[in-house]
């Protein structure tokens, strides 16, 4: 009997055990829907992000689309890592596997292997970082106010500037005690970020390597922001706050009771950071089936 049902796997990314880390729903070879249809599916499975994969001619290459609850994303970190773990499970391969996930014109290289404690260890090549201009003191003050902070809460030894490997995050360095009090409290925060050339912000305590991130209206906090972790590690190394010859470990999600650990390796040649590799452990926590695609 023919059926239009299609399934998905749930993955917890940057997690040392199930029910921690950042969750994602992974769909392999689902029906080809409109963008509105994929948004309905993402909402139906109650995951903040869902990733959809279709096999290409090369068996290790998949065409890929990523959605959050209200839009499609050109790139995101933790869905890509979660997808590689699901693909590895489906392959049954016992060793390390290299995957290529194409997002529009961008080809993301990912490697996965079975972890010793269960789950999968996954790495992603994030490419070379870019840095934006150093912002002046007036801008620092306005950003601090928009984040419910005082200028004194900012780390005085580090500049405020964007860093990127695809998405521009304004790096907002703060003292550790400021993180619990940080909230976006202005309705035009996106416009404020645009003045620096950034699209999003990453509030980072350099001394403890802990961070927070929200959508720009402040309504949703991200558990673990893989697309920001690589640029943040590069930013710390660029400004002498991290040794690029050793892995940089960043934590996020504590304030949502979803502790997450992101590990970043930096490759430096000629004094320049040439390559960023993001690493995370992925736990596969469940699966489900949708009986039929949404209409429209």
Image (cartoon, rainbow, N blue to C red):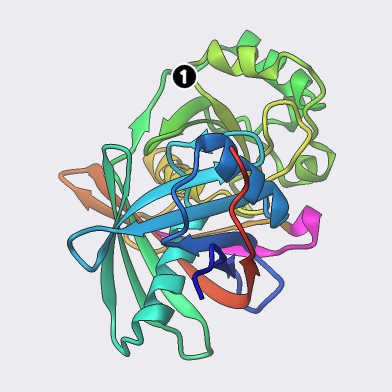
| Residue for badge 1 | 134
Furthest toward the left, the residue is 270
Tell me which residue sits at (53%, 68%) in the image: 3
Question: Is residue 120 within the magenta segment?
Answer: no
Front residue (pair 161, 112) = 112
SS for dot 1: loop
Across and down, in percent, residue 276 comes to 33, 51
The answer to whether 112 is drawn above or below residue 250 in the figure is: below
Front residue (pair 17, 30) = 30
Furthest toward the front, the residue is 1
The answer to whether 117 is drawn above or below residue 213 in the figure is: below
Instruction: Please tell me how crowded label 1 is: few (under 14), some (14-19), or many (20+) other residues with Cα within 10 Å.
Output: some
The answer to whether 185 is drawn above or below residue 58 in the figure is: above
Tell me which residue sits at (57%, 29%) in the image: 200
Across and down, in percent, residue 195 comes to 54, 10
Across and down, in percent, residue 232 comes to 48, 43
Give the quadrant of the C terminus: top right
Question: Is residue 256 within the magenta segment?
Answer: yes
Left or right: 219, with 155 as reference point: right
Across and down, in percent, residue 83 comes to 45, 63
Left or right: 208, with 103 as reference point: right
Front residue (pair 186, 268) = 186
User: Picture quarter containing residue 85?
Assistant: bottom left
Observer able to see residue 189? yes
Q: Which residues are magenta?
A: 254-265
Observer able to see residue 248? no
């Amino acid at each position: 009997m023919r059926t239009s049902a299609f399934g998905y796997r749930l993955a917890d990314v940057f997690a040392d055990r199930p029910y921690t880390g950042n969750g994602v729903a992974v769909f392999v070879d689902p029906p080809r829907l409109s963008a509105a249809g994929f948004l309905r599916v993402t909402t139906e499975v109650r995951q903040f992000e869902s990733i959809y994969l279709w096999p290409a001619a090369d068996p290790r290459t998949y065409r890929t689309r990523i959605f959050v609850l209200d839009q499609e994303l050109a790139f995101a970190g933790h869905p890509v890592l979660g997808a590689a773990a699901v693909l590895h499970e489906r392959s049954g391969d016992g060793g390390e596997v290299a995957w290529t996930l194409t997002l529009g014109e961008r080809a993301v290289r990912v490697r996965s292997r079975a972890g010793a404690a269960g789950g999968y260890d996954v790495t992603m090549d994030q490419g070379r970082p870019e840095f934006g201009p150093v912002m002046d003191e007036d801008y620092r003050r306005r950003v601090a106010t928009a984040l419910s902070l005082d200028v004194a809460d900012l780390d005085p030894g580090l500049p405020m500037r964007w860093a990127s490997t695809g998405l521009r995050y304004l790096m907002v360095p703060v003292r550790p005690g400021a993180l619990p009090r940080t909230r976006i409290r202005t309705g035009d925060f996106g416009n404020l970020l645009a003045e620096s050339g950034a699209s999003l912000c990453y509030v980072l305590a350099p001394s403890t390597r802990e961070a927070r991130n929200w959508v720009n209206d402040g309504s949703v906090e991200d558990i673990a922001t893989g697309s920001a972790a690589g640029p943040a590690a590069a930013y710390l190394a660029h400004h002498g706050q991290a040794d690029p010859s050793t892995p940089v470990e960043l934590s996020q999600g504590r304030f949502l009771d979803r502790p997450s650990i992101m590990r970043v390796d930096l490759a430096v040649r000629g004094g320049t950071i040439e390559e960023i590799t993001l690493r995370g452990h992925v736990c596969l926590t469940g699966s489900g089936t949708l009986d039929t695609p949404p209409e429209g």
